[in-house]
Amino acid sequence: MDVTKYIAYRTHKSFSAVLTKMTIVALATLLAGCVVPQPGGNGQLLYKREQQTNRGYYLYLPEDYSQGIKNNPSRRWPVVVNFHGMKPFDRASAQAKEWQYEADNYGLVVISPELKTSDLFMEFPLKKIHNYVKEDEQAVLNIMEQVFRSTQADSTRVLATSWSSGGYMAHYMVNRHPNLFTCLAPRQSNFSGSILDPANVPYYQDMPIGVFFGENDFAVCRTESTEAIKWYKQHRFRFIDGRVVIGLGHERTPQTAAAFFARVSKPPILPVRPALAQETLANLQLIPAEFAGIADLPSTEPTLSGRSPADELTNPSTLPPAQGNSTANMTRTSGSTRATKPRLLAAAPTKPPVAAIGTTNSKFKAAPKVAAAATPPAPAAPPAVRVVTNPKIGLAPLYISFDVEAPTDVLQGASCLWTDNDEPICNSPTGQRIIMNAGDHVMCVVIRTKDHREYRAWTTVKVLSPQPAMH
């Protein structure tokens, strides 16, 4: 054999072997990220076909569905339409399994259609509306109609959600049919603004939009999730909640969308199994996308507002301004300024556990004394820091969201410690909690900035005892 040809042959074989190994490793990584770690549910999982398009889909009826119909034949269940990721790494069956546990926790009917768009042979990234996109669109419309006609699904409370490349269809379907959906919350998903119609924006600018993705997610999912947040803000959507899940890669987090859906629905969806719903939320740490090192996110709200979509939906006009809020308090303990402690709605909280935050930096010690004749400079006004909860009052078990509002230089890179009646519950700028016990709950946050300044704020949530059942 010619030496040159032999070397070329061996080089080709070596390169092919390396390429094959790299492909196997890549596929193994993708498949590992596509495993469904969520436990199964106790409801009923059905596989059906839509009659006109013959498209298959999975329908999950939650654990309380059958008994609920017996007790109240007119009852309706909120609906999740779930768009799966790229086949063969994800399928409608996996999405149906992923959502069962949260469907039981919140009492949700889940529709998981089989898609042609989310496929290994699709255009990726998706930039055009191909025939398979239009076919999926019609199939999903028919499937939704069939489910609403044959079950007790509530057509007035419908969440569109997705995982991975299913995000293309989730954003597209809501954009093209905004009257059919009440909320959009893609997770670790892709996005393409080029397949959306800006002319439809006015029809759903008030719809709550939640975008969730992992801190260590695939680069394309992080990038396109960020582009989604930008797109909705640039088109002046009113309720945008972009969140980064700290420490997570391309992993499934249905609880983020379920909790968001429950929080922004009107009226809010109270969990059927509040303790289990709380447990799945407690396993995640979410921070606003603006605080995760993602720059140039335009905002239609005040700069880096911590206000949640639920706060806006409740009644934005009733929220007091940051300065002078009589039910929320701000104190800067490391400087020379201390705000006057306001009168709370309930008894004042005991001293929060400052030890968990750290000691005051020496550079914030009091300034040297000045001559008696000199007029001391007026202390600088402390920045506005306040706690916002939604709601502030309700029956136990009460589902609440809580946020801290503060300027950029306070929250950027800061650590937070939240307590409920002095019990530590969270260490991110925002969170959710299901309060089981009736009474006054003082929600307090202690913030320690990256330059060791310290602030605290609190407000009171009143939880009422459940009303006795009427017989």
Image (spheres, rainbow, N blue to C red):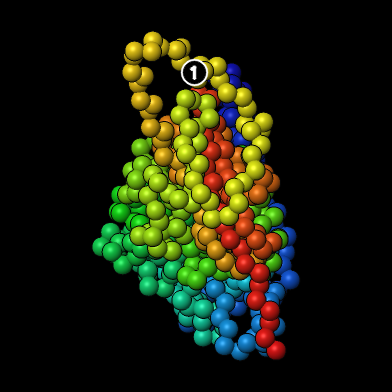
Q: Which residue is drawn at 54% across and 72% down?
A: 79
Q: Which residue is drawn at 60% across and 71% down?
A: 108
Q: Residue furthest front?
A: 373
Judge whether residue 107 can be spotted in this image.
yes
The answer to which quarter of the image holds residue 169 is bottom left
Judge whether residue 184 can be spotted in this image.
no
Image spot of residue 181 (x, y percent): 43, 69
Q: Which residue lies furthest to the left in this view?
A: 199
Pick the residue in front: 374 or 444. Answer: 374
The answer to which quarter of the image holds residue 101 is bottom right
Residue 408 is left or right of residue 359, and the answer is left
Pick the residue in front: 340 or 243. Answer: 340
Q: Kindly identify which residue carries mark 1.
A: 366
Image spot of residue 65 (x, y percent): 66, 79
The total number of labels drawn is 1
Q: Residue at x 51, y 81 (%)?
A: 148
In the figure, 463 relative to 50: above or below?
Answer: above
Pick the residue in front: 449 or 132. Answer: 449
**Which quadrant of the rendered structure holds the N terminus?**
top right
Image spot of residue 218 (x, y percent): 53, 41
Q: How crowded is mark 1: few (under 14 residues within 10 Å), some or many (20 or more)?
A: few
In the figure, 277 relative to 321: above or below?
Answer: below
**Which quadrant of the rendered structure holds the C terminus?**
bottom right
Image spot of residue 149 (x, y percent): 51, 85
Q: Residue at x 67, y 45 (%)?
A: 422
Residue 423 is left or right of residue 268, and the answer is right
Amino acid type of the residue that numbered disc 1 sits on in the rendered structure: Ala
Pick the residue in front: 55 or 429. Answer: 429
> For the residue labelled by badge 1, is the local secondary structure a helix, a strand or a loop?
loop
